[in-house]
Amino acid sequence: TQLDLIEKYPDYIFGASQPQHYQFMKDNYPEIYSRIKEAVKKGQWELQGGMWVEADCNLISGESMIRQILHGKNFFKEEFGIDVNNLWLPDVFGYSATLPQILKKSGINYFLTQKLSWSQFNEFPHHTFNWRGIDGTEILTHFPPENTYNSELDSEFLVPAQTHFKEKDFIDEFISLFGVGDGGGGPKPENIELGRRMADLENSPRVAFDTAINFFDRLANHEKDVDTWVGELYLELHRGTLTTQALVKKQNRKLEWKLRAVEMLWSCLPLENYPSEELDGLWKKLLINQFHDIIPGSSINLVYQNTHKEYEDIQGDCDSLIALAGQSLFEQYPDSFVVANTLSYLWTGMISIPESFDGFSVLNENGDTVCVQKTKDALVAFVELEPLSFSTFNKGQALSQELELGHGLTLENNLIRYDFDKKGQVISAFDKESKKEVLESAGNILSLYEDRPNDWDAWDVDFYYRNALVEIAEATDTMPGSNGKVVQELNLTFSVGDSSIIQKVKLYPHSKRLDFDTKVDWKEKHKMLRVHFPVNVRAEQATFDIQYGHVQRNTHENTSWDKAKFEVVGHKYADLSDHDYGVALMNDCKYGYFVKDNILDLNLLRSPNNPDPDADQGKHQFTYSIFPHEHDLIRSNVIRESTCLNQIPIVFSGVRSDNGIPVKLDGNGLELTVLKKGEKEDYLIIRLVETSGRHATGSLKLNGTLTECDLMEWNDTGSQTNVEGSVSLSFSPF
């Protein structure tokens, strides 16, 4: 249709984003694709938006954001010879404060959306502005003042937009997103005819057909004139998309971490063997399912049948690639196993070990015996793994191992004591180091709420849900579980609504982190399950993990802007700290938080009926954790602990290792997030991030030539350094 329209109207220019669509067209309709390429050459078809798809920007990781742009821009450049330098996301449900830095370091200079016009309570104060992210990077941003992506391009849409355009005193043009945008189809002939007639219509906004990039380049002349917005672009709507279709969100996060591990393992082998083609396909399969109606949970059931199948395929292929890498990296040896820690943090905790070690002691590489314990589920060991390491553990002497069960409803180690009651609630958490009671009142409160939003079932959580409490879950059974030197466990069973919840609560040696491994058989309709902990901390702001950084949000409701943020995004943790003490609520696959006053609250499950009547029905498994700590967030181990919760070490059975990971990182607040082969050449890409929001120094150990480059791996941004041993590093915040 659009190809016919640009022939009929030579002055009309069509624009389309999402390289994945172009790939579909190339694969399935090569003749039409050739016509598109010709139209692009003639300047009648514009390539827009640098991401592989118009992805959700709340839920996906920082690395996924980079890969969206990496694959998107590479496709447009390779297929069309064009470097697209704008991000085009008109319909995405909020925008992370990390984005400006990622965009600018990916060669994207302009950003467009109109979605914040949908906000429930507060009108955004700008249409054109500089958007400043967490590190201080700014990007020129435009919100089309028609407040829609379905404009008819007539006076009914354009006159109010011109009247209310907030920068009209010094900017004399804005973009109109006209045609059928939501649902597809694009502009219609009558839209184009109207636009032509309004090109010079007296007492009416003037319409001119042009490309987005020409508009942005003209807009850049006003970059110093417009105001600046600092921090996230929070949509005061569609908050339910942080939780709906929980399995999709869980699988996405697990696969983001697994793909990272695959890349790192293969980077330890000769690069000529690196599975570039396979990983390219796996990443693109993950990226398409990050589209802003798939991962948010707002698609029909048929979509999720396909999504879950694709996730299973990615999982299976990643597992195969990990096994293949292990075969090349490690030597077969039946009485040993290797544990790979792909994090740049010291990893301390419990791992499951091969069953062949049952009845034997386990020795680390120094010959020291590590603690081993038999639980009902597995044989486990308590290990301490150096950052970025392969550690070999060997079979020792015969050792009798019996299942030992605990007594009572207390979990305790040298640092902390947790007391539970018969309801399954934590009635006390006493920090022995600080001599402080962590909880103000009982925690692990599992609450069932009525969840019937006014307008958008799968999309929304409305603020009045907190006045619609249906039931607080109380345990029907509390049983001590395994009790030993590796882990202490408490088993809790709840019945709530028509659903059941089974929790295995775990405390480990030398740690204050308490894990709630949770299984839910969910049979609700229009209900929401949340957990909360009232803590003995008062702070005006809480800190939330986001992509490659964190943001702070007010815990009070002084303004309408604060009140609107009753459901906000957090990835691995939300932390409430004063100067001396804090508590973090962590998770391995959840995103929707409520943190007001001293309440840490996490959204666990929803059960909307539309557009998928079976949304979230059935079995779920996830972990959330409470982590009390001394000091504030930055001086604590919250970031490390939450990362370790999400990236469990990989165990290779029947092998031993003389190899290592070829880089080492040293420095507080620094994290090595990616080690992979370059997209086009045989070199290693090392991605380093400052995670604490402060100036940091450190060192990177490796041998070779080191060059700083942009996130697209196209342009060197620093001089080459020959390294034999280590190189000093200096980072600004984030």
Image (cartoon, rainbow, N blue to C red):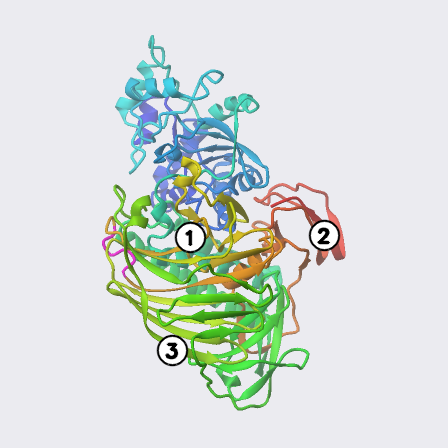
Q: Which residue is mark 3?
A: 479
Asked whether residue 460 is in view, the answer is no
Instruction: Say what amino acid the circle numbered 1 marks.
Output: Tyr
Q: From the viewer's perspective, is residue 244 above or below residue 323?
A: above
The label nearer to you, 2 versus 3, is: 3
Q: Nearer the viewer, residue 682 or 160?
A: 160
Residue contact between numbered discs 1 and 3, judged by CB atoms under 8 Å: no
Range shown magenta: 612-617
Element carrying mark 2: strand
430 lies left or right of 185: right
Q: First in sequence, mark 1 or 2: give its number.
A: 1
Tell me how many marks there are: 3
Q: From the viewer's perspective, is residue 569 above or below residue 114?
A: below
The x and y percentages for residue 145 are 39, 25
Q: Is residue 664 magenta?
A: no
Label 2: few (<14), some (14–19) or many (≥20) C-alpha neighbours in 10 Å: few
Q: Which residue is mark 2?
A: 705
Q: Nearer the viewer, residue 220 or 488?
A: 488
Asked whether residue 75 is in view, the answer is yes
**x 29%, y 32%: residue:** 180
Q: Nearer the viewer, residue 458 or 487?
A: 487
Residue contact between numbered discs 1 and 2, judged by CB atoms under 8 Å: no
Q: Is residue 615 magenta?
A: yes
Instruction: Say what amino acid the circle numbered 2 marks.
Output: Thr
The x and y percentages for residue 35 are 37, 34
Q: From the viewer's perspective, is residue 52 above or below residue 147?
A: below
Element carrying mark 1: loop
The x and y percentages for residue 491 are 39, 74
Q: Which residue is mark 1?
A: 591
